[in-house]
Image (cartoon, rainbow, N blue to C red):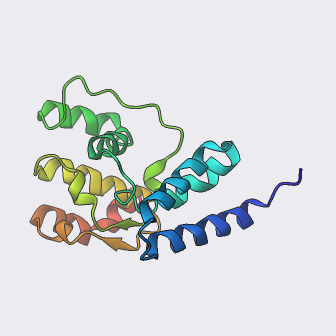
Amino acid sequence: MTELNDDVLFYIFQDLYYLITTSNSNNEKKYEKSLYFCLFVNKHWCKIMVPILWSYPYKHVYKKESLLNIIISHLSDNSIKFLKDESIIEANFQKQKLSFNYVKFCRYLDDIHKIFPIRSSLLEEEIYKLFISECSSIKSLSSEMFQDQIIMTFIMNWHKYADQ
């Protein structure tokens, strides 16, 4: 069997994703699950689908806590230790072994503030720093990011973190 080129598959999946997520269909959730199941066809399809599904991370999440744990697992060991020392995350938190650098695929962070279980500017700042340093193609941000003065200052100086 002949395989399709990665770029061709990517554009097919991307167009399919766009059609499903922008349709006014009553079956939208059913079709979104079809996108999710593409991850399990084979490694090749998974490698292509992960960036598409993670472009808007909050949109397809089933458990906010799981998404937050994946994102926190991308933080440096020093950041995680700092958050543990400040009792912001549980002392027994263990980084997950991740198959991808999921955070780098995030482009639309409109609703990302909804994953935070409590309002913690330290946790938010660490995660926003992570997004800015890892995501080269952010298309939109949450308005919540602009309500906190610490985070606003951080965003205004994003170039310092993006170069690290």
Q: Nearer the viewer, residue 121 or 71?
A: 71
Asked where in the image residue 106 lies, by quadrant, the reply is bottom left
Looking at the image, residue 77 lies above or below residue 129: above
Position in image of residue 136 (x %, y %): 47, 65
Q: Position of residue 99 (x, y in %)?
A: 53, 38
Above or below — where is 101 with respect to 9? above
Task: Identify the residue at horizontal 28%, vertical 51% (top origin).
Answer: 127
Residue under the image location 54 percent in, 52 percent down: 50
Q: In terms of image quadrants, where is residue 144?
A: bottom left
Extreme front residue here?
26
Q: In the image shown, does 126 or 30 lie closer to the viewer?
A: 30
| Residue 52 position within the rendered picture, expressed as x and y whole percent measured from the top left | 53, 61
> Is residue 31 rendered to the left or right of residue 96?
right
Q: How many marks?
A: 0
Quadrant location of the C terminus?
A: bottom left
Q: Residue furthest right?
A: 1
Q: Is residue 131 above or below residue 146?
A: above
Who's the residue at 79% across and 61% down the image?
Answer: 5
Expressed as whole percent of the image width and height from the top left, the position of residue 94 reads 32, 26
Q: Report the side of 129 relative to 116 (left or right).
A: right
For image coordinates 53% across by 74% down, the residue present is 19
Give the camera-side residue of 142 and 132.
142
Please indicate whether residue 37 sits to the left or right of residue 3 in the image. Answer: left
